[in-house]
Image (cartoon, rainbow, N blue to C red):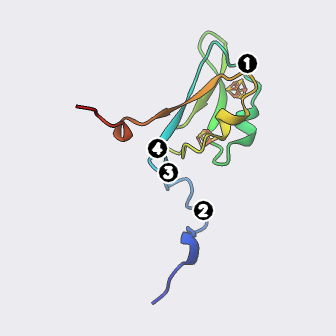
Amino acid sequence: MKITLGGISKPHSSKTMKTGDWGTEYPVVDEEKCTACKTCEYLCPDACIVVVEKEDEKKVAVPDYEYCKGCGVCFSVCPVDAIKMELKDIYKLEVC
Ligand code: SF4
Ligand code: SF4
């Protein structure tokens, strides 16, 4: 029997492996606060938040939720607090 220690995935599999459902939280960008500095884009360990230009020509950071693991690095490094982490609905407890 062959066991892969540490759960290492096969090479070149990151694009097909949708990791967006791994995390319990997800980042939400406040477009008014975002200065498009790209700090989050440079430091995201999964390269899944990028600064894009919108139709009104304003540039903002946009997370790709199909791959975002909810690690919170972008939230931690944003110099203007434009990102907040939200708990996914499935992890919210309903109090009766
Ligand atoms: S929470 Fe982590 S994985 Fe998701 S966009 Fe931010 S830095 Fe990237
Ligand atoms: S680090 Fe903050 S201000 Fe800079 S691009 Fe990302 S969200 Fe925008």
Earlier along the polypeptide chain: callout 3 or callout 1?
A: 3
Q: Residue furthest bottom?
A: 1
The residue at which mark 1 appears reads as 35
Q: Which residue is mark 4?
A: 24
68 or 76, which is in the foreground?
76
Which SS class for mark 4? loop
Q: Position of residue 64 (x, y in %)?
A: 54, 37
**Which quadrant of the view contains residue 83?**
top right
Which residue type does callout 2 highlight? His
| Residues under numbered marks 1 and 2 in contact, where contact means CB atoms less than 8 Å apart | no
Is residue 8 positioned above or below 26 on the image? below
Q: Is residue 65 visible?
A: no
Instruction: Read off the residue under disc 3.
Output: 19
Q: Residues within 10 Å of mark 3 (few under 14, many from 20)?
A: some
Q: Residue furthest left?
A: 96
Element on which disc 2 rests: loop
Mark 3 or mark 4, earlier in chain: 3
Q: CA distance from mark 3 to mark 1?
A: 27 Å
* Residue 91 visible in the shown view: yes
Q: Residue at x 55, y 61 (%)?
A: 13
Instruction: Determine whether the beta carbon of the residue marked 1 sits less than 8 angstroms from the nearest atom of ligand 2.
Output: yes
Determine crowd level at label 4: few under 14, some 14-19, many 20+ residues with C-alpha closer than 10 A.
Answer: some
Q: Nearer the viewer, mark 3 or mark 4?
A: 4
Is mark 3 in CB contact (under 8 Å) with mark 1?
no
The first of marks 1 and 2 along the sequence is 2
Residue 2 percent location from the top left of the image: 49, 86
Label 4 sits on what residue type? Thr
The residue labelled by disc 2 is 12
| Identity, as a three-letter code, of the amino acid under mark 1 | Thr
Residue 58: image quadrant is top right
